[in-house]
Image (tube, rainbow, N blue to C red):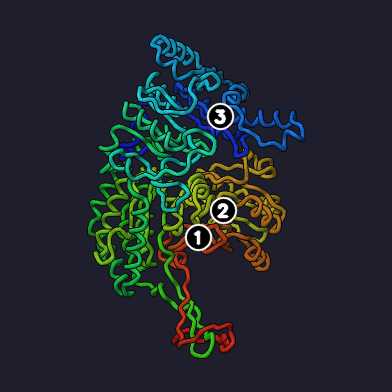
Amino acid sequence: MDSADPARAFVKDVKRIIIKVGTAVVTRGDGRLALGRMGSLCEQIRELTTQGFEVILVTSGAVGVGRQRLRYRKLINSSFADLQRPQGDLDGKACAAVGQNGLMALYDTLFSQLDVTSAQLMVTDNDFRDPAFRRQLNETVNSLLCLKVVPIFNENDAISTRKAPYEDSSGIFWDNDSLAALLALELKADLLVLLSDVDGLYTGPPSDPQSELIHTYVKEKHEGLITFGDKSRVGRGGMTAKVKAAVYAAYAGIPVVITSGFANNNIIKALDGERVGTLFHREAIKWASTGDVDARKMAVSARECARRLQALSSQERSKILLDIADALEAKEEEILAENEADVAAAQQAGYEKAMISRLALKPGKISSLANSVRVLANMDEPIGRILKRTELAAGIILEKTSSPLGVLLIIFESRPDALVQIASLAVRSGNGLLLKGGKEAKRSNTILHKVITSSIPPSVGERLVGLVTSREEIPELLKLDDVIDLVIPRGSNKLVSQIKAATKIPVLGHADGICHVFIDKSADLDMAKRIVLDAKTDYPAACNAMETLLVHKDLVQTGGLNDLILELQERGVSLFGGPKASSLLNIPEANSFHHEYGALACTVEIVEDVNSAIDHIHCHGSAHTDSIITEDKEVAELFLRQVDSAAVLHNASTRFSDGFRFGLGAEVGISTSRIHARGPVGVEGLLTTRWLARGSGQVVDGDKEIVYTHKDLNLEA
């Protein structure tokens, strides 16, 4: 959890949680129980109890389950004549009585599979008028929780004297949402979670594209602004009832989160401090001025600034970059001081050495970054280049031109120097930019962002480059597919996979960097040793470092591999073998070929020939970077043509697969995608195309009068 977000700080004191799950969550559209969602709910509750939380469940769904069952019984027991008559509604109390049994039976089965015991407690609104009942309720629940039993509450609709839902001014509940709020107060809960079929409370109906998710509800701000949609498809209250219950509990001192019961692990995420759903808290008004960053406004501002940037001349855009380079060198001492503070904090926190190495700005790094920015400033103008000119017909010329993508969201870990490279590429390519770095580099990223944005002229606006300061803002940004045009995650396999799974915005990146070096039988072994040692030990944590060494079988038989293996081990590289190599070289067997070590370790395997090496790479690689070492040109060409990776090299280290080394000036990342851009992504990878046509009054009119020539023209007008 990011400490900069006070609205989430309450979770550190939570022990007793009440979870309310609505009918729309526990049942499917056809009225049957949603087994997958209920199973996920029970798994989350089990995990929470294992962590020491006290969990109380309030569940709806009995009436819906009973209605489904009674409709079926009525159908099979009705004559054809009965079915021709108008069908009246089933008795709701009978539905509740029948459905409660089935609902609890399923909960009992699911919890039993997870080695959790549950208990059923049925209540009515009148019960709470009796002080003795309330005392006994607390005693029973406390006793169950001490025994690690999960109490499951539901209103006893079958015997309730209420004829219809109503709001009782005395505070007695009127549906399961208000029951959950009442129980939260009565049982002194620390948190109430109301699960819904939508992500949380929106400013309008969730189906309306203009509606925005409210992360923190401020009664004074939002009460009169919210437009509620239809009530729940099956329950009694819908979002209106949830908000009333949430406000009631929150302003009595119990934080409430309304979130989706359809999404995975949202309860766990809320307790981890993640921004899921809508938080209700009586202190919310105090956070209104410093709390949630409006993700949409940040993205829209970046787009507006980008359009102003694109309107500048090439020389004016180049000057911005030159000013950034000068500012970096002028502020070097401040930047290094903040970076040293980040490194010290990371060391104290026990971060791995590889991460600390990526975090540290080594001597000369600021000067190197400034020089790379100047290289970008002096490169040919990338925006508005004419890529193709065509005469469509007499007097009408069509041009295909290079154009900025729009707004980029870059999420990166550890390396603060990446911020400078990415921001410079965005300015050069005319794109707006939102940046989210790792918390371990927070101070470094903040000072670098300040230095860069202070160099952007007011005519463009410093919001061209936005810095996202809290990870809880990321989920909301990932929903803005109408404003953000491309997401580029730079970091671990886990980070990239999570981003890809969480957004509709196109994602450019790689989930793995499983890079291979294949030593063919005709390889120069001295050359092979230099290349392999460089590929593995130059920077083991890099995504272009070698992770698997493939060796032609003939080299094992002649002993040509022995020196290399010894040298790798002397350099501190831990070796793991495939089925063949582990026995032949007497090294431990690798758990998997598809593994990125990111450290001084690699897998070794013996292959029959170049075709076997290619098959191995296609089967176990990640299509990032692969290299062959051979003196046989035919074998080399076969490898270069057939290995389907973003970068394929002959007699060269995989570490060359890098934007700077490829002459791109810098890179925003390396893409293993096959759409838009592949390999190291520099300025060109941040551009798309536009079509510009210049005519002299032509109209289509059914193509009756126009004669198409489709003649290719020189690019120069």
Mark pair 2, 1: CA separation: 10 Å
Please state the horizontal and vertical placement of residue 587, each as a whole percent of the image: 62, 40
Q: Nearer the viewer, residue 209 or 267?
A: 209
Residue on which the image places disc 3: 61
The image's mark for residue 110 is none
Please state the horizontal and vertical placement of residue 433, each as a whole percent of the image: 37, 58
Residue 476 shown left or right of residue 500 in the figure: left
Could you tell me if the residues under marks 2 and 1 are in contact, i.e. CB atoms within 8 Å? yes
Q: Considering the image in quadrants, where does the N terminus appear?
A: top left
Residue 40 shown left or right of residue 474 in the figure: right
Q: Is residue 187 above or below residue 637?
A: above
Mark pair 2, 3: CA separation: 52 Å
Could you tell me if the residues under marks 2 and 3 are in contact, i.e. CB atoms within 8 Å? no
> Earlier along the polypeptide chain: callout 1 or callout 3?
3
Residue on which the image places disc 2: 515
Of badges 2 and 3, the one in the foreground is 3
Q: Hey, what amino acid is under mark 1?
A: Ser
Please state the horizontal and vertical placement of residue 178, each as a whole percent of the image: 42, 27
Q: Residues within 10 Å of mark 3 (few under 14, many from 20)?
A: many
Residue 104 image-quadrant placement:
top right
Please state the horizontal and vertical placement of residue 484, each as a whole percent of the image: 42, 57
Residue 82 image-quadrant placement:
top right
Q: Is residue 150 visible?
A: no
Q: Is residue 169 visible?
A: yes
For label 3, the SS is loop
Q: Nearer the viewer, residue 97 or 569?
A: 97
> Earlier along the polypeptide chain: callout 2 or callout 3?
3
Mark pair 1, 3: CA separation: 56 Å
Of badges 1 and 3, the one in the foreground is 3
The image's mark for residue 657 is 1
For label 2, the SS is strand
